[in-house]
Image (spheres, rainbow, N blue to C red):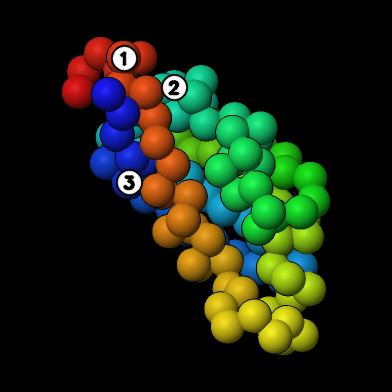
Amino acid sequence: MSIKLYDIAHSRAGDKGNTLILSLIPYDEKDYELLRSLVTADKVKQHFKGAILGEIVRYELPNISALQFVCQQALAGGVTTSLVMDTHGKTLSYALLEMNMDTSQISHI
């Protein structure tokens, strides 16, 4: 059985040019280690296959219990230049929260 990321976390986004920054923050700090172990840059890249074309780098922010993903070539050329209907990072932050997580690795849910 699996759950969605939105069950235990929320996301914030920023965009600049063709670069997207996604932050993933657990509702409960105790879930930070779980997110850190399960939500890798490779899994985010796979989740956004075809939408994010460039490299994804994950930064760990243990002092605020958050993960940050810097995604290159993620906004179809950039918010102001793309002909795509919605290229803002905010939309992709909601899409990140749709990622499935295997609940067999979650002991407290």
Question: Mark on residue 104?
Answer: 1
Q: Secondary structure at mark 3?
A: helix
Q: Are marks 3 and 2 in contact (CB under 8 Å)?
A: no
**Relative height, residue 58 to residue 92 (above, below):** above
Q: Quadrant of residue 81?
A: bottom right
Name the N-terminal-most of marks 3 and 2.
3
**Residue at image point 49% right, 39% down:** 66
Element type where label 2 sits in the image: helix
- Which residue carries the number 2 mark? 33
- Does residue 75 lie above or below 103 as drawn? below
Q: Give the label, 1 or 2, closer to the camera.
A: 1
Q: CA distance from mark 3 to mark 1?
A: 17 Å
Mark 1: secondary structure: helix
Bin the neighbour count of mark 1 within 10 Å (Cα to Cα): few under 14, some 14-19, many 20 and up.
few
Find residue 16 and name its label: none
Crowding near the residue tagged with mark 2, few <14, some 14–19, many ≥20 C-alpha atoms within 10 Å: some
Whole-percent x and y of residue 82? 73, 82
> Looking at the picture, how far across and down is residue 27, in whole percent?
29, 41
Q: Tell me which amino acid carries mark 3.
A: Tyr
